[in-house]
Image: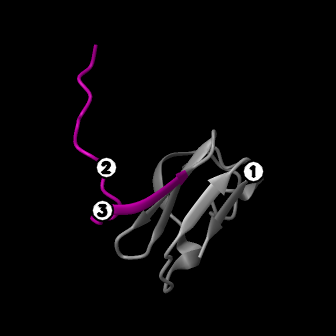
Amino acid sequence: AEDADPSPTLLGGERAIGVAASGLFSLALSADGALWSWGCGGQGVLGHGDEQYQLLPTKIEAFAGHRVVAVSAGDGYSFAI
């Protein structure tokens, strides 16, 4: 069996200060106010303008220039303030 790397994955060099998840995808809010998503992109829930699956956390560029302060996720939706 392969040894798993116990160190956390960094989000653009920032630490995660908030997380939200559904059964199919996850969101992470980084300390700099950026929002990241990964998992199943069906119904556009990842916020990347498509429905592609994202294996690794990917920054949601639609929020560039804005500071996200809260996130929520559920069955078929994602929400950011």
Q: Earlier in the sequence, mark 3 or mark 1?
A: 3
Q: Quadrant of residue 45?
A: bottom right
Q: Nearer the viewer, residue 81 or 1?
A: 81
Q: Nearer the viewer, residue 51 or 63?
A: 63
Q: From the viewer's perspective, is residue 54 above or below residue 81? A: above
The amino acid type of the residue labelled 2 equals: Thr
Instruction: Name the residue located 49 percent from the left edge and 76 percent from the top edge.
Output: 69
The amino acid type of the residue labelled 1 equals: Gly
Residue 39 visible in this rendered orientation of the protein: no
> In the drawing, what numbered circle is on residue 16?
none
Mark 3–mark 2 Cα distance, whole angstroms, equals 9 Å
Image position of 12 (left or right of 21): left
> In the drawing, what numbered circle is on residue 9?
2
Q: From the viewer's perspective, is residue 49 above or below residue 42? A: below
Disc 1 secondary structure class: loop
The span picked out in magenta is: 1-20
SS majority, magenta: loop
18 part of magenta stretch:
yes
Q: Residues within 10 Å of mark 3 (few under 14, many from 20)?
A: some
* Quadrant position of the C terminus in the picture: bottom right
* Mark 1 or 2: the one toward you: 1
* Residue identified by numbered label 3: 15
* Quadrant position of the N terminus in the picture: top left
Mark 1–mark 2 Cα distance, whole angstroms, equals 25 Å
Q: Residue furthest bottom?
A: 65
Residue 70 percent location from the top left of the image: 53, 70
* Residue identified by numbered label 1: 76
Residue 32 visible in this rendered orientation of the protein: yes
Q: Residues within 10 Å of mark 2 (few under 14, many from 20)?
A: few
Disc 2 secondary structure class: loop
Residue 6 percent location from the top left of the image: 23, 36
Disc 3 secondary structure class: loop
